Amino acid sequence: MVLGKLRSWLKYFAKGNEESKVDAPVSLPTLENEQQQIGCSFTEWYNQRQSSNWLYVDVSPAVIKHLRSHFQELVSQTITAADKIIAHKFNLLGSGDYIPLDPDRSETPHFSPNTPQPSSLHLPDSYHPIDWYLDPITKLRFPQGIPHKQWNLLEMRPGSADIKLPWELARCQHWVTLGQAYRLTEDDRYAQEIAYELADFMAANPIGIGINWTCTMDVALRALNWALGLALIRSCKTLPPDFWQSAYSALFAHGVFIYNNLENNYEVTSNHFLSNVVGLYYLAKVFHDLPQGQIWEKFCRESLEQEIQVQVLEDGADYESSIPYHRLVTELFLGAARLAQFYNEPLSEAYLKRLHQMVDFLIGVLRPDGLMPQVGDADDGRLHIFTRYGTWQPQDARHLLAPAALLLKESAWLSYAGVDGIWEAVWWGFDVERRQEAEGRKQEPGARGQEAEGRRQKAGARSQEAEDSPDESRGEWPFAPTLKDRDLPPLCKEFPQAGLAVFREGGNYLLISNGVVGTKGFGNHKHNDQLGFECHINSIPLLVDPGSYVYTSDFEARNLFRSTAYHNTLKIDGEEQNEMRPEWIFRLFETAHGKGLGFHCTQEYSEYQGQHIGYQRLKSPIIHQRRFRFLQQSGTLHICDRLQGTGSHLLEWHFHFAPEVNVTPQGEGVYQISAQNQHFVFCTPKTLAGEVNQAWYSPSYGVKIACQSLDLTIKAELESANDWFFALASEAHYSTLILNSKF
C-alpha cells in the first residue's frame, strides 16, 4: 500500500518532465542555427562578445590586483580549494572528502554527438573521468543512459542511494572557484580543468540523458555556474578556439532544455521553478543577441516579476515555511536583480521593494552568532558560491548582505557583512573603478528591443552605481577590509504571515515558530514546529531546532526530523500537529492552523501568545495555546502552556538542546543546563516525569551530531483550561520564585 502511494507521489512530482516538450517531434534551436539567423559565424559572435564584459563576475584586472593585496587569506583559501578540485577531491552534503573516479571510463572523455567536439583540445593522461552518478556515502552508483522522462527514483535507484549527492556535484558550483583561482593566479591549469570537466560531463551526460537531467532546477543551477565559470576563464590563451564553440553550444543546449522542461506544472510553484527561471535568465543574457535568447529573456523577466509576488509573503518571508530555503530564494531573486542592474535594465520598483523586505526578514531572524535558525527544511542550496567553497558554513547567510546592501542602497546592512561580505560583493561586480567610470560618462539607453548588432555593441553595459560605496568612514571600498562583524541590532518583531516572532538583545535571543503550512498549504518544506522555539542566553545556543538531515535516502529519518517530537513543543496522544503521511515526505496536511493571539514589547520584557488547533481532531479535542515572556536584558524565559479541553490525554513535551549542552536533573522538576563553562536553570512542573535522552542535531544536509533532549510526560485528566509553567534562566537570574510567577 505504502509502495503504491509512494509511486503516485513520485509520479506526481515528475509530472513537469512528463509534460516536457524536449522530445517532441519538432526542430529544437541550436546555437549554430541561431547564429545563422543573425548572419554571423560562431567566431564572429564570440569575438564580438569578447570585446565586452559578459556577466557581473567578469571583474577587472585592477580589482584582482587589490584582492591579492588586501584579501590574502581568502585568496589562499580559494587557491587551496581549486587545487582540491583539480585533484577531483570533493566534500558535499555530509560526504566527507571523496574522489569520484568513474570505473567505466578509464579513457579520455570526449563530447557526446549532441555537442561539437573540440578536436584540438587534448586532455592529459593524468585527467581521470569523474563519476557523475555516484553516491559517495553509500558507495552506490545510479544507472546511466536513461532518458530523463523515463526516470523513476523508487524503481531505478540502487538501494537507498541519495540522488542529491550526484546532483550536487553536477551543479558544478566549483567551476566558479576554478575561475576565481585562474583570475587570481593566471595559472592556466584552473581554466583547463573547466574545459576538461565540460568534455567529461557531456560525454557521461548527453543532453536529456541520465539522472543529471531529471531535475530542471539542477540543470539550471549548473547552466548559470557554467556561464560564470566560462566568463572567468575567457582570457585563457591555451584553450583552442573550437573549445569555445563546443562549450557555448553545450551551454545553449542547456537553455533549450530548461525552457522546455520548466517545473511549473504542479499545483504550486516553488524554489524549483524560480531556479529554472533564474538559471535561464543568466543564459538569456549570455545569448541576448540571438533570437532564442530574447525569447528567454522576455519570459524570465515576466516570470521573475510574477514569482516574487507569489513566493514571497508580505512580511518578506519565502512562503515555503523554511528559513534556509528563504536564504536560497533570496539569493536567486538577488542574483537576477543584480544581473538586470548590470545590464542597465533594472527590474521593477515593486520587485526591488519585495527583495528589500526579504533581506530585512533574513537579518531579522538571525541568531546572535549570525547564523540562521533552522526553521523548516534545509539542504544547503545556493545560487553560486563565491566565498570559501568547500568550507563555508551552511547556516551562515551573511555573504548576501554586502551585495544586497550595494544593490538596494542600504549601507547599514554592511555593518553585519564582515570582510567575507566585501569579498563576496566584489565577485558580484561591485567595485570602485567601474563605478567611477560609470559616473564619468553619460548613461546609454538599455539594449532591450534593439537589433542584434546594436545588442552586441551594448552587451555588458553597466548601470550607474553612484551609491555602491559606503560612507568614507568605513575605508576605501571595497579594497580595505575594515568592516568587522558587529552585533546584530536589537529586535522585537512579529512576522505575522510567516508565523514567526523574534526577540533579540545582544546575546539573548528567542525565536518562536507558529506558521501555517506553507507553499499555499502544500507543506513541501514545512516542519511540525507549531509553538516551537529557539532560545539563546549570553550568546550561547541552548534550545535549538534540530534541523532537517536528509530527504529521500532515509524516509524514517526524514519524517523524524520534521515531526512534532523533534521540535521544542508539545505532543498530545501521540498525534502530529499537522497530519503527516509517511510516504508523502514532501507534504504536510494542514490541521493546526497556527495563529498569533498577542504580541507586545516593553523595556522590561517582550511577550508573544499563539495557538494551534491541530489536536482538535482528537476524540476529546484540545486547543494548545502557549504564551512566552522573554526578559531580553537577562535572557530569562517564561512559558505557559494552556490546554483548552477535557478528558484523559498523554502529554509529551520535548526540548532539544544544542550539541555540547549538558542537561543534569536536580530533582523536583529542576534541571541544570551547562554550556561553555556557564550554568543555567530550567524549571518544569514537578508532576512531569522527566528523562534526558540522546537526540540528533543536523547543522547541514547529510550531517548529524549527537545532542541531548529533555522529554517530559504525564497522563493527565484535563478539566476546561489547564496551565503548565516552564522557565529558563542563567544561574545569576534564577530564584525560587521563577516557576511560580503566573505571568
Image (cartoon, rainbow, N blue to C red):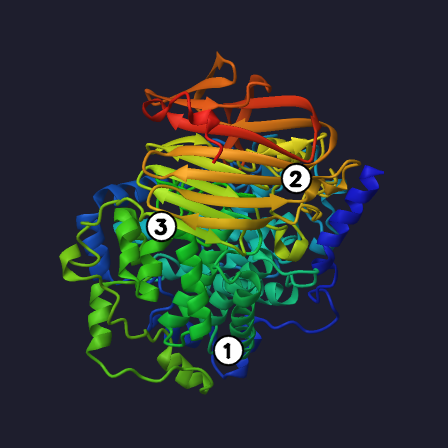
- Specify the amino acid type for callout 3: His
Farthest residue toward the top?
Answer: 667
Residue name at image x 71 percent, y 53 percent:
13
Q: Is residue 131 left or right of residue 413?
A: right
306 over 124 or under it: above or below = below
Q: Which mark is residue 450?
A: none
Query: Which residue lies under the disc numbered 2?
Result: 552
Give the foreground label among 1 and 3. 3
Q: Which mark is residue 399?
A: 3
Q: Quadrant of residue 349?
A: bottom left
Q: Quadrant of the N terminus?
A: top right
Residue name at image x 49 percent, y 65 percent:
248
Query: Which residue lies under the disc numbered 1?
Result: 290
**Mark 2 surroundings: few (<14), some (14-19) or many (≥20) residues within 10 A:** some
Give the foreground label among 1 and 2. 2
**Mark 3 surroundings: few (<14), some (14-19) or many (≥20) residues within 10 A:** many
Q: Secondary structure at mark 2?
A: loop
Residue 100 visible, this angle: yes
- Specify the amino acid type for callout 1: Leu
621 over 483 or under it: above or below = above
Circles 3 and 2, Cβ within 8 Å, touching? The answer is no
Q: Earlier in the sequence, mark 1 or mark 2?
A: 1
Q: Is residue 25 left or right of residue 174?
A: right
Q: Nearer the viewer, residue 506 or 378?
A: 506
Q: Is residue 253 left or right of residue 194?
A: right
Residue name at image x 26 percent, y 45 percent:
486
- Specify the amino acid type for callout 2: Thr
Q: Quadrant of residue 497?
A: bottom right
